[in-house]
Amino acid sequence: MSKQVRHIATVAGAALVIAGLVAMLVGFPSPDGSATLFYLTGEESPFGQARALWNLALEVTRPPLALAPEAPIQHLPDNPLGANVFLEGEVEVAKRERTLRMLRDAGFAWIRQQFVWADIEIHGKGDFEDRRNQPPRSAWEKYDNIVELAERYGLRIIARLGSPPRWAHRGYADLGDFGPPADFADFADFVEVLARRYRGRIRHWQIWNEPNIYPEWGNQRANPEDYTRLLCLAHERLKRVDPDNVVIAAALAPTIAQDGGGYPGGGLSDLIFLERMYVAGAARCFDVAAAQGYGLFSGPFDRRLSPLQTNVARHMLMRDIMVRHGDAHKPIWLSEANWNAVPNDPSIADLGRFGMVSAEQQARYVPLLFERARAEWPWVGVISVWFFKRPSDAEIKQSWYYFRMVEPDFTPTPLWEALVAYGRRR
């Protein structure tokens, strides 16, 4: 046996021992070597497990992360179960109510819901009448109903803010529907109007979504300094209205890209983006950090931690940055989390972009993610599963459609059934 082969065998053997210890420490069963390797690598195939073990062996040489697991953490909920919903797209009030009733009955405590700027202050600054169809009506009507229904069913709202109206882009570059406004003060004014209207009814406000990738910061390069300026303006207004408002920074998309974005597929590493936010003074402007908790190409127990690897544990690298900047007391909420149970159909756009798992794997993995967070990540708060349902099946040929928990007609998927069972026994 060559020296190299002996070394690999030694590393693999040590990894198996470590895996067994980890499984025992966190309370997960490990009936055989294959299961133990799954709990260590997040991989189910022998080839994937072997590759992951090699990656883990190489990571031994890296300095340990500063995670401060014993630090007291603010804004941790009793119940972390959240769901992303698109209630603004549901025309029928009965469907909005059915959605929230189902989530409540399944044990969920949170909904992450967009309050779309372009759908509220539609035609001009200070104009909250919807004249897109006749007869005109208040643009607040739909959102008032969402807030009232959430209160009725005891669900707390994470209000995701962004998507400027066309008038707010005038005089600026053509940035598309998601780019920031020409004048950041217009966004701050909108945030204050929202906060005053729903004072005491909505307390959790998330400022933007994935500004580190295209197209969420528009047709331009990601700019952590500009995003920080927008965040700080919103923070000041929210705290002015109610000091108890909780400001959540934008969820950063997990990416290893460093080109800055500005075109399809482009982006800036979430780790670089966060570091530059801190340098720009963001620490004083948010109460909760946010990440995306997608499993992508491996399962919920993938323990690889590399800036050049995206997996469900990547937020640990964000935590390291936060601790080094004195924010050990702040939690990370996972704004979106899931695995993509997309059918192996070549007619589906972006097939494999978000990974590919079976419906059975998706149904196993998501509850296991909640369990891993409970056992290993004391800094992780709300985890919002992406997503409950879409209003229609118009996007059925898009791979991201297959993150859904139920079909547009409320037919449950295996994932939904697994989450109902998990929510009721936790």
Image (cartoon, rainbow, N blue to C red):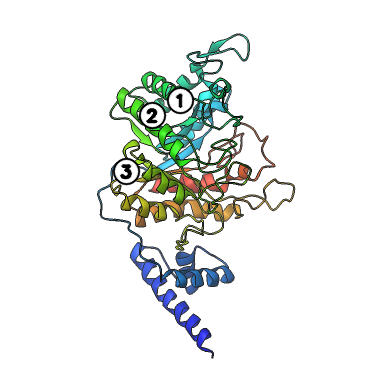
Which amino acid, mark 3?
Answer: Leu
Which amino acid, mark 1?
Answer: Phe
How far apart are labels 1 and 3 at the CA level? 28 Å
How far apart are labels 3 and 2 at the CA level? 25 Å
Instruction: State the SS at label 1.
Output: helix
Relative to 216, is 119 above or below? above
Relative image position of residue 408 (x, y in whole percent)? 61, 34
Picture residue at 48% right of the left edge, 65% below the top: 41
- Mark 3 closeness class: few <14, some 14–19, many ≥20 residues within 10 Å: some
Q: Are marks 3 and 2 in contact (CB under 8 Å)?
A: no
Picture residue at 32% right of the left edge, 43% below the top: 76
In this rendering, the label closer to the viewer, 1 or 3:
1
Which amino acid, mark 2?
Answer: Leu
Instruction: State the SS at label 3.
Output: loop
Residue ID for mark 3 = 76
Q: Are marks 1 and 2 in contact (CB under 8 Å)?
A: yes
Relative image position of residue 51 (x, y in whole percent)? 54, 70
First in residue order: circle 3 vs circle 2: 3
